[in-house]
C-alpha cells in the first residue's frame, strides 16, 4: 500500500513521510504509508560508472571505482580458480542447501564451499572466469535475478606458502551475508565475513565512515531500503566494535521498510547490547517486529517491559491496566474462530497493490506501483519501486476477482504518487492523495521530507477535471487517506499535523453545501493511539481503519468502531483472523449488503509487496429457535403418557424425525424451518394412532396438544350395533372421491384394525336426500366401495371387510328428507361412511 501512513512497502510509498525525526506515516505501499513518503524527483540511482582514464585499470581498481567489495583467497582445496559472486558467509551449515536451491531456481549456477582457515561456509550465486564479467554481473544484479547484496571473491589457488588463504584486497563496502529479501531462509546470526586480523585493514575505518555517512543521508531522506543495506555493510565491517546507535538505525531502516525479519534480528542484537536500557520507543518496535515474526510470547514480555518503563509516569497505573487488558484481548483474538474467507486476487502485480475503493456499481479503484511502461520508469527511492498510479477495474460479483484494469484519468495520475481515493455519493467528486509538488518538482519541508496532500477533482461531462488542493493541507505535515461518509457531508482523513495524539491520527472535517470545509477535528483516544492510525473507511455508522497501536496480531491490523450519536465513536474492536495477520493488513472496505469487500496486506504468500485480497464475512448463524413441543396425554383421564412414539412428518407424510415421549409425556423437535407445515404422528400400545397437522412460526416454539384414545373406547354402541367411534367420513356433493380430511379419519380406522388384527368390519355409506333416489343409491355404493379400496390400499386385508354397501338416502340422520328447507351443512351430515364392527 503505497499511500499509507504505515510501514509496509506500499505504505512506505504513500507513507507520507512524516520526517525522519518524526513518525513515519507509512509507505504509501505498505502500511505506514501516508506519512513517511520521502519521494525523490530524480531518477533512481545507479551504480557508479568507471572513471575514464588513459591507462587501463586492473580488476581491483575497476572494483574500487564501482564500489564493489572484493577479496582474494588462494590454495582452497577442491575450489576452482575464478571469480565468485558471494551472497553469504555462515558459520553454521543450517539452511545453506535451501539458499543454494533457491538461487538455482532463479537459473543461477549457485553453490557453496568451505574455507578451512576460518571454517566459514561461502554461498555463491555464480562463478566467472573473467573479473570483468563478474563486475558486469554485479552491476546488473545478475540480470535482475538476485536483488540482494553481492561481493566478489577471487580464488587464485596459485602456489604460495601453505596456509596463505586470505588476500589483501577489500575494495568497496562489504554487504551483509543474508539477502535482504524477507523470503530468504532464516539463517544463524550474521557472522564476520571480512578479512581476519592478518589482512590489511588500514583503510577500513575511513571506508566505514564513508558508508555510514551515506547511510545516514539515505535514512534522513527516508530511503530506507538503501540505508538498511549500507548500515549492514558498516556493521559487518566491524563486527567486534558495533555501535548501538548504528544497530538501532539498521533495525529502524528495516522496520520502516516492513522487513520484519531483519528488523527483528537487529532489534534483538540491540537488546542484547542495551538490555533494559532500551528506550520505550525501541521496545515498542522490537515488540512489533517480534509479532511480525510470529513470536507472540516474546512480544508479550517486551510489552510488559515497555509498560513497566512507562509505569513511572503519572499514567503508570493506567498503563498497567491497559497492558493486562491488551494481553487478554490478544489471547481472545488468537483463540477466536476465523471470521472471514479471504482470497488473493489474480490482478496483483509483483509490486504494491492496495487502497481499494468502490467506484459506481461494479467498479473498483486501487493504487498500484505496477510498471507498465515500455521504457525507463521513474522509481521511488524508498523501496526502488515505480511511483504509484490509480487504476480502475471491474468487479466480478461471483468470483470477486478484478478484471480489465486500466489507468485512471490522465488528469489525476501524474509522474509521482497518487493513491488512496474516495468518492462522493453521486460519484461526481473525488478526493485522493498525492505528493506535495510544484510543477515538475517535489516540494520538501525544512527537514527535506516530501509530504502528502489531499486533492479534490470534479467530474464534468464524464471527464475528471484538474485537481485542486484542499485548504487544510500543510507543507510541514502530511494529509492523506480520505474517506467519505455515506451522506457525503463529512470527510475523514489521516494526518501527522500538530495536535495529533500519536504518530498519525484520523481526523474529520464537515463539508458544507458550498464545498468549503470546517476545521479538522481529531477523532479522539477511542480511535487514535500513540502510534499509527491509517486508512479509514466509513460504512453506515461503523468506522473501519488500520492501526498498530491497538492490540493486534502484529504490524497494522484492521479495526472497527461504531459511532454513537451521544458518546461518539465507541471502543475499537479488532476485526480478527484471517483479515488480520502478523504482517500489515490495511485499506479495508466492505459492502454491508453482501458482507463482501477488499483489503490489502503484505503477508507472506502473496504475489508482490502489498497485495489485494477479497473477503466474505462469515456471519455467525442466528440461533434457530423454531421448534415443536408438546405432551402426550390420555384423552379421557388426562394422564401423561410416557414412551409414546412421536414422529415428525413433512406434508407428504415422509418421516423426518422421531422421539419417544419422556416420563412426563413431553417431547420436542428443534432446529426446524420457519413457516413450514409438518404433521405429528403419535403411536402408543393400546391407543389409537393420532395424526395432526401443525405449522412452525417465525423463530419460535410452537406447542401441540396431543390426546390419545384408548382403543376400547373407540367402539360406540347405537341401538345394539357396534360402530367404530371415529369422526364421520364425509364426501363432497355428488362426489365419491376421498377428501383429505376423510383420509385422515380412514387412517385412524386402518390403525385401529392393525391394533386389533382379528377385527372385521362392514362399511355403510349414505347420501343426502337431494337428487333421484336411484342415483343416490348408486352414488352411495360408489362411496362405500371407494372407502373399502382406501383401507385395502393401506394394508387392510379384503377378507376383513365383510361388505361395503351403499344405502342412498334411506338412513338420514336428520329431517332433511326434502320436505323441509335445509342448509348445506345439514345435508353434509347425511353424506357419510360408517364402520360396523362385526367381529373383534
Image (spheres, grey):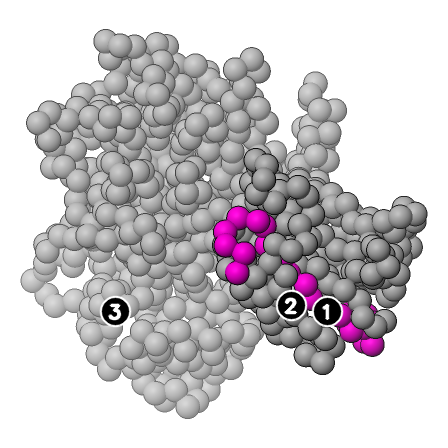
Q: Which residue is mark 2?
A: 805
Q: Nearer the viewer, mark 2 or mark 3?
A: 2
Residue 797 higher or lower than 731, as above or below: below
What residue occupies the far front of the structure in this picture? 819
Whether residue 758 appears in magenta in the rendering, the answer is: yes
- Mark 2–mark 3 Cα distance, whole angstroms, equals 104 Å
Range shown magenta: 753-774
Quadrant position of the C terminus in the picture: bottom right
Give how far across and how far down residue 390 sits, in percent. Answer: 22, 40
In the rendered view, does 714 fall on the left or right side of 170? right
- Mark 1–mark 2 Cα distance, whole angstroms, equals 8 Å
The residue carrying pointer 2 sits among few (fewer than 14), some (14 to 19) or many (20 or more) residues within 10 Å by Cα, namely many
Q: Which mark is residue 142?
A: 3
Q: Nearer the viewer, mark 1 or mark 3?
A: 1
Q: Which residue is mark 1?
A: 762
Q: Quick one: label 1 or label 3, which is nearer the N terminus?
A: 3
Give how far across and how far down residue 736 sits, in percent. Answer: 53, 60
Amino acid at each position: 500500500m503505497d499511500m499509507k501512513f504505515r510501514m509496509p512497502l506500499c505504505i512506505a510509498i504513500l507513507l507520507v513521510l512524516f520526517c525522519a525525526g518524526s513518525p513515519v506515516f507509512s509507505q504509501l505501499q505498505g502500511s505506514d504509508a501516508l506519512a513517511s513518503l520521502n519521494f525523490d524527483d530524480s531518477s533512481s540511482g545507479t551504480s557508479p560508472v568507471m572513471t575514464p582514464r588513459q591507462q587501463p585499470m586492473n580488476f581491483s581498481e575497476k572494483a574500487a571505482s564501482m564500489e564493489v567489495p572484493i577479496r582474494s583467497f588462494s590454495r582452497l582445496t577442491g575450489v576452482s580458480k575464478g571469480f565468485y559472486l558471494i551472497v553469504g558467509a555462515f558459520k553454521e551449515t543450517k539452511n545453506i542447501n535451501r539458499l543454494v536451491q533457491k538461487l538455482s531456481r532463479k537459473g543461477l549456477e549457485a553453490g557453496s564451499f568451505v574455507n578451512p582457515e576460518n571454517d566459514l561456509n561461502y554461498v555463491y550465486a555464480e562463478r566467472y572466469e573473467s573479473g570483468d564479467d563478474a563486475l558486469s554481473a554485479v552491476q546488473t544484479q545478475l540480470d535482475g535475478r538476485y536483488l540482494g547484496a553481492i561481493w566478489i571473491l577471487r580464488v587464485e589457488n596459485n602456489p604460495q606458502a601453505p596456509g596463505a588463504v586470505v588476500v589483501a584486497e577489500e575494495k568497496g563496502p562489504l554487504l551483509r551475508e543474508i539477502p535482504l529479501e524477507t523470503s530468504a531462509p532464516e539463517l544463524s546470526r550474521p557472522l564476520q565475513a571480512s578479512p581476519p586480523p592478518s589482512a590489511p585493514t588500514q583503510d577500513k575505518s575511513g571506508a566505514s565512515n564513508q558508508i555510514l555517512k551515506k547511510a545516514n543521508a539515505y535514512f534522513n531522506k527516508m530511503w530506507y531500503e538503501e540505508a538498511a543495506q549500507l548500515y549492514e555493510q558498516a556493521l559487518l565491517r566491524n563486527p567486534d566494535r558495533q555501535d548501538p546507535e548504528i544497530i538501532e538505525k539498521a533495525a529502524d531502516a528495516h522496520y520502516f521498510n516492513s522487513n520484519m525479519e531483519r528488523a527483528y534480528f537487529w532489534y534483538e542484537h540491540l537488546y542484547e547490547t542495551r538490555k533494559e536500557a532500551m528506550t520505550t520507543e525501541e521496545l515498542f518496535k522490537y515488540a512489533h517486529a517480534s509479532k511480525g515474526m510470529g513470536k507472540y510470547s516474546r512480544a508479550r514480555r517486551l510489552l510488559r517491559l515497555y509498560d513497566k518503563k512507562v509505569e513511572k509516569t503519572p499514567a503508570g497505573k493506567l498503563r498497567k491496566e491497559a497492558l493486562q487488558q491488551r494481553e487478554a484481548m490478544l489471547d481472545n483474538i488468537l483463540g477466536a474462530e476465523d471470521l472471514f474467507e479471504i482470497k488473493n486476487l489474480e490482478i496483483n502485480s509483483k509490486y504494491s497493490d492496495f487502497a481499494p475503493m468502490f467506484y459506481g456499481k461494479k467498479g473498483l479503484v486501487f493504487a498500484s506501483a505496477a510498471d507498465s511502461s515500455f521504457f525507463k520508469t521513474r522509481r521511488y527511492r524508498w523501496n526502488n519501486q515505480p511511483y504509484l498510479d490509480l487504476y480502475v477495474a471491474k468487479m466480478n460479483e461471483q468470483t470477486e476477482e478484478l478484471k480489465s484494469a486500466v489507468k485512471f484519468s490522465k488528469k489525476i495520475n501524474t509522474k509521482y504518487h497518487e493513491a488512496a481515493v474516495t468518492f462522493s455519493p453521486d460519484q461526481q467528486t473525488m478526493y485522493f492523495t498525492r505528493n506535495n509538488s510544484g510543477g515538475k518538482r517535489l516540494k520538501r519541508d525544512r527537514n527535506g521530507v516530501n509530504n502528502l496532500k489531499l486533492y479534490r477533482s470534479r467530474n464534468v461531462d464524464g471527464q475528471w477535471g484538474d485537481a485542486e488542493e484542499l485548504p487544510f493541507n500543510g507543507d510541514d505535515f502530511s494529509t492523506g487517506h480520505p474517506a467519505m461518509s455515506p451522506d457525503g457531508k463529512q470527510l475523514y482523513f489521516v494526518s501527522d499535523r500538530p495536535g495529533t495524539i500519536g504518530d498519525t491520527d484520523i481526523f474529520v472535517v464537515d463539508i458544507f453545501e458550498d464545498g468549503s470545509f470546517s476545521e479538522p477535528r481529531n477523532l479522539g483516544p477511542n480511535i487514535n493511539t500513540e502510534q499509527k492510525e491509517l486508512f479509514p473507511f466509513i460504512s453506515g455508522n461503523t468506522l473501519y481503519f488500520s492501526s498498530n497501536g491497538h492490540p493486534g496480531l502484529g504490524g497494522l491490523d484492521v479495526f472497527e468502531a461504531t459511532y454513537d450519536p451521544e458518546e461518539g465513536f465507541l471502543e475499537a474492536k479488532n476485526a480478527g483472523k484471517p483479515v488480520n495477520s502478523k504482517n500489515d493488513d490495511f485499506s479495508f472496505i466492505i459492502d454491508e449488503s453482501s458482507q463482501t469487500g477488499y483489503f490489502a496486506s503484505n503477508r507472506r504468500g502473496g504475489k508482490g509487496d502489498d497485495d489485494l485480497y477479497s473477503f466474505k464475512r462469515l456471519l455467525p448463524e442466528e440461533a434457530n429457535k423454531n421448534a415443536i413441543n408438546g405432551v402426550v396425554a390420555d384423552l379421557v383421564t388426562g394422564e401423561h403418557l410416557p414412551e409414546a412414539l412421536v414422529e415428525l412428518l413433512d406434508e407428504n407424510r415422509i418421516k423426518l424425525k422421531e422421539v419417544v415421549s419422556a416420563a412426563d409425556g413431553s417431547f420436542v423437535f428443534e432446529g426446524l424451518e420457519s413457516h413450514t407445515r409438518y404433521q405429528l404422528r403419535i403411536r402408543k400400545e393400546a391407543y389409537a394412532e393420532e395424526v395432526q397437522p401443525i405449522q412452525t412460526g417465525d423463530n419460535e416454539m410452537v406447542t401441540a396438544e396431543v390426546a390419545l384414545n384408548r382403543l376400547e373406547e373407540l367402539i360406540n354402541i347405537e341401538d345394539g350395533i357396534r360402530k367404530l367411534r371415529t369422526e364421520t367420513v364425509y364426501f363432497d356433493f355428488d362426489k365419491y372421491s376421498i377428501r383429505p380430511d376423510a383420509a385422515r379419519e380412514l387412517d385412524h380406522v386402518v390403525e385401529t384394525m392393525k391394533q386389533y388384527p382379528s377385527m372385521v368390519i362392514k362399511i355403510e355409506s349414505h347420501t343426502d336426500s337431494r337428487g333421484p333416489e336411484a342415483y343416490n343409491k348408486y352414488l352411495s355404493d360408489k362411496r362405500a366401495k371407494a372407502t373399502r379400496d382406501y383401507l385395502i390400499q393401506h394394508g387392510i386385508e379384503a377378507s376383513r371387510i365383510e361388505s361395503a354397501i351403499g344405502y342412498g338416502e334411506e338412513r338420514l340422520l336428520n329431517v332433511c328428507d326434502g320436505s323441509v328447507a335445509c342448509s348445506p351443512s345439514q345435508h353434509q351430515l347425511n353424506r357419510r361412511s360408517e364402520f360396523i364392527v362385526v367381529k373383534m
